[in-house]
Image (cartoon, grey):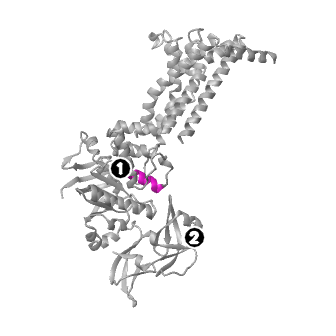
Amino acid sequence: MSHFAELKTVTKMFDSTVALDNVDLKVEEGEILALLGPNGSGKSTLLKILALLENPTRGEVYFHNAKISNQNRERTRMETTMVFQKATLFNTTVYNNIAYGLKIRKVPKNEIQERVNMALKLVRLEGFQKKYAKKLSGGEQQRVALARALILNTKLLLLDEPTANLDPKNASIIEEIITSINREHKTTIVIATHNMFQAKRFPHRIALMENGRIGEIGEPAEIFGKLSKTLASFAALENVFTGNARTATDGTTIVDIGDNTQLIATGQHQGQVSLFISPEDIILSKNPFDSSARNMMKGRIVEIQDLDSLVKLKVDVGKLFTVQITKHSFDDMKLNLNAEVYMAFKASSVKII
Amino acid sequence: MNEIIDGFTKAIQLIFSGDPRVVEITLRSLYVSGAATLIATLWGLPIAMGIGLKDFRGRLLLKGIFNTLLGIPTVALGLVLFLLLSKSGPVGFLSTLYTPTGIILGEAILITPIIVSLATSALEAVDPEIMNQAKTLGATQSQAYVVAMREAFSGILLGGINSFNRAIAELGVAQMVGGNIVGWTEVLTTAIATETAKGNIELSIALAIILLALVFIITMTVNIIQRRRK
């Protein structure tokens, strides 16, 4: 594979803050590359530099081995497009939003119409043309933003946390689209995510980012296999823990992750392990309840983050867990800060890395 | 009391008979305020884009200055302009004192802070990522500015209309720079003031009704436009 874009010793400063620190990166033609790291690790800045929206403070950017300069920046920018974490829609209809890039490229009107219809079909929003973009739900807005980028058929597609604030249904629609675009159009895709599960699912390569640097880069199996210790150091990633595993008599594994917290996992493991639990796999209740879930613990809500149709909670059970529930059930349960809750998840939800 | 009712009746007659002087003053007022708004927008909008969309040292100070200038007394500005434009003043050679052009210029300066302040707030309220969004979809720098302006359109329009309202309704600058010369520089406000002093109440009332009606219609139109855009 030849490489599509390359960053050479790129440093980006915002005032005195270092967002990217001496980053070298090659993006291969036709690959899906995931940037995995906690918030503030420099993923978005790296994407904006690849999108040619930000200039590096030091270092160079190459596209097809040609150095990007003020002379070729605007022209080269046409080869790439970026979908921001927050859908930044124009204050107009869905149609005008999606058609914008094609209008700029002076595509004939009837072709624009045809392609907008196709793009809407792809993101499963047929018939939404005349709707007012900003009145759509969060998930629908994110899909309009994706359609607006996909319609351009750029060779490089940059996605910043495309599913971070979405419910599982919308998230899986978007993941499917990304994979199929890469397969059918050979589009090179760079996707920033802090969702380890997502990073494991479809990218060809993963780059681990922390404090503005790329720590490790490689294939998912390699990264998740050999580098579990580095991975676990991503404290800000959700529900990643390390602990001591021992096989129980019933064939499951008990992992002591410290602070009086023990988890039950499927399979047989021994010794030091890293593990994570997807925030949407955890069930919450205000009262103790019977269930088939092997892991049940009592804790206190210490943080509430409202994400449109979803709510993310931090629950302190000795260790801090992130739990994701829908806004609907959050309201139904009348949860509030410092409320006592019971948390349950299956042994099979504990993914040992 | 009878005098007032009488004045009103005659005023209404003046308006509906299409009295040439009433028509002329009204049209001149519209022309002068319209031209002033246009000029203020032409030079105010780039300033607003600079303050609202870019980050530089002294940005807040500049914004503060324009906000302060919002409250400038029109008579004081009129005096300054009078001194500047009079024959012995620094720009006296332009011979714009006591001409419609002089009023247009004066009003344009008066309303510039309004258009700058309102357009700046409107542009600041636009999502800061919107220009990057346009660029990543293929827009050039200038096309990205157009997108930001379009996002801020209703705020900018509001600035323009408020400026026009201020221009058409103010007296100080029009009086001191225009001089209210009959058939040449008299506008609604100056004519109302002068004709009232002369005891020509029915003409004053007629012009005041027109002035109020204009301001009312314009404000209503803005409200409708804004509601439609929401």
Where does the magenta region start and end? A138-149
Dot 2: element: loop
Q: Which mark is residue A149?
A: 1
The structure residue drawn at horizontal position 61% and vertical position 32%, both measured from the top left corner, is: B220
Dot 1: element: helix
Residue farthest toward the right in the current orientation of the protein: B2
Please state the chain letter of the residue tagged with numbered disc 1 in the rendered image.
Answer: A
Please state, as top left, top right, bottom left or bottom right, where the N terminus of chain A lies in the image. bottom left
- In this rendering, is residue A279 above or below B126? below
> Which quarter of the figure has residue A19?
bottom left
Total labels: the figure holds 2
- In this rendering, is residue B191 above or below B129? above
Q: Which mark is residue A280?
A: none
Q: Position of residue A201 (x, y in %)?
A: 33, 67
The structure residue drawn at horizontal position 33% and vertical position 83%, both measured from the top left corner, is: A269
**Among numbered discs 2 and 1, the one appearing first in the sequence:** 1
In the rendered image, residue A161 lying in the magenta stretch gets the answer: no
Kind of residue at badge 1? Ala
Residue occupied by mark 2: A339
With A258 as the anchor, is A270 left or right in this view? left
